[in-house]
Image (cartoon, rainbow, N blue to C red):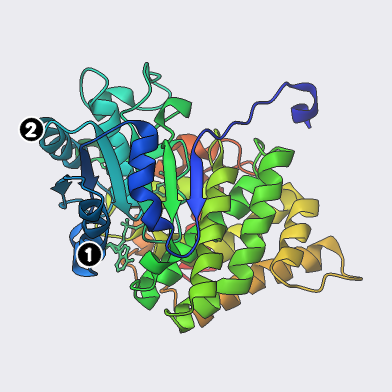
Amino acid sequence: MDNYYKTREHQCITKSKHGVDALQSLPESLAELGVKKPLIVTDPGVVGAGLLDHVTGVLEQAGYSCAVFDQVVPNPYVETVGSATQVYKDNGCDCLIGLGGGSSMDTAKGVGVEATHEGNILDWEAEKRDLERRIAPLITVPTTAGTGSEITVWAVITDAARKFKFNVGGPLLSPHIAIVDPRLHVSMPPYITAGTGMDALCHAIECYTCHWSQPQTDAAALAAIEYGAQYLRRAVGNGQDIEARYGMAMSAHLAGIAYGSDSAGAIHALTQTLGGYKPELHHGPAVGATLGAFMEYNWIGNPQKFRRIAEALGVDVGGLSDRDACLLGAQAIYDLAEDIGIPSLADLGVSEDEIPQLAEAALNDPQNCGNARDMDKQGYEWLYKRCLGCI
Ligand code: NAD
C-alpha cells in the first residue's frame, strides 16, 4: 500500500504505429528520425519466413539501402550483440531496425547501446550501471506477439560465462518507433504463437499484480489479459486469422506498456534464470508451462487483483469466494495452456534433481522482488515441483 504515499512515474516514449500493413510506414518512420542507413537485426527463422525480403522490399522501393545482421539466436548472447555491432560499424549505419521476436529486438537494443557507449553490453547491466545516453535510433518491428520488447525499456541478454540472462534497461533504451503489423505474424507456427502468446499474458498478469503496479499500467495489463483470453486460441488454431493476429499483437504490446519501467515477477525470475541454464529452451513455452502454477501460488498475495484477472480471463466470478474465483482463474490458464499445446516443464527438459539449483537461481534474480507473494527458495521449489507434477 506504500504506493499511495509515493510519487510514482510512468512514461512511454516509444511512438506506436499499428494495424494491418503498418509496415508500409517504415520509410516515413526513417524520415521522421532523420536517418538514412539502417542495420536490420534479425534471425534465420524470420529470414526463412520471408519477412526480411518483405522489409527490404519496402525499403528499396523508397530508395533506402540497408545492411543486415541475420545471425541472432534465441536467448541472444553478449557475443551476438558484439557481432551485430561490428556489422553496424563496418557498414556506416546510423540507425537500427529490430525485426523479429524478443531475441532480435533485444539484440538490436544492445547494438543501440554499444553504438553510443563505451565498452560492451555487459558493462551496462541494470542495477550495476545506468545508461548515459539515448541509444542509436531504433525502429522495432515485432514478428511474434509475446515479449512486447518493441515498446519495453528492457533488453534481455545471456552471459554464457555466468549462465545468466541479465537485463539492460531504462528510458534511454526505449525504441524510438514501434511498427506492429499483424501480417508479419501469420507465418508463426502454432507452437511459437502459443508460447509467445502465453508470455504476453504472463507479463500482463505479473505486472498487474506486482508491487510496482500503478493505475496506468493496470489499465494496459487488464486489456492485455482480455485480448489474450479472446484471441490466443484463435491465433493458434487459425494462423491466417488476421483479427486474432492483431488482437494478440495488441495483447503483447499492451503488456509491454504494463511492463513499464519496472520488472515483472516470480515467473520471469524463474524462466529467465532457467533460460540462462538452458539456452536452447524457448522463453515462451517455459512461461506457458509455469503460469498456471504461478497463479495458484500467488493469489493469496493479492486476492482482489487475482479475482479481477479471473474475470478478465472470462470466468464468471459472481457469488464465488475470493479463493474459488482465484483458483478458477488459475484453472483457466491451465485449460488455455492445454488447448494450445503448451508442453510441460518435463517435456522442456527440466528434471526434479535440478530443482534446488534452479530455485536458488530464481531467488537471486532481481525480478524476484516486487512479486505479489513474498518469494523464498521453498516458494520456487513449490512452483517447480507443481509444474513437474511432483505435488
Ligand atoms: P524469439 O525472438 O527467440 O523467436 C523464437 C523463434 O520464432 C525464432 O526461431 C524465430 O525465428 C521464430 N519466429 C519469430 N517470428 C516468426 C514469424 N513471424 N514466423 C516464423 N517464425 C518466426 O522469441 P520471443 O519469445 O519473441 O523472444 C524471446 C526473448 O525475448 C528471450 O530472450 C526473452 O528473455 C526476451 N524477452 C525480452 C523482453 C523485453 O522486454 N525486452 C521481455 C520478455 C522476454
Answer with mark 1 or mark 2, whichever residue precedes in sequence: 1
Neighbor class of circle 2 (other Cα within 10 Å; few <14, some 14-19, many 20+) is: few
Viewer-side residue, 136 vs 339: 136
Q: How many labels does the image show?
A: 2
Position in image of residue 384 (x %, y %):
47, 59
> In the image, what residue occupies the spot 23% across and 40% down?
38
Classify the position of the C terminus by image quarter. bottom right
Q: Does the residue labelled 1 lie within 8 Å of ligand 1?
A: yes
Residue at 80 percent across and 63 percent down: it is 323
Left or right: 174, with 31 as reference point? right
Residue to which mark 2 is pinned: 90
Residue 6 in the image: above or below residue 179: above
Q: Is mark 2 on a helix, strand or loop?
A: helix
158 on left or right of 15 = left
Taking the image as shown, residue 200 lies to the left or right of residue 214, namely left
What is the C-alpha distance between the residues marked 1 and 2?
24 Å
Identify residue for label 1. Answer: 45
Q: Nearer the viewer, mark 1 or mark 2?
A: 2
* Residue for point 43% across, 23% down: 127
Q: Identify residue type, mark 1.
A: Gly
Instruction: Give the camera-side residue of 30 and 379.
Output: 30
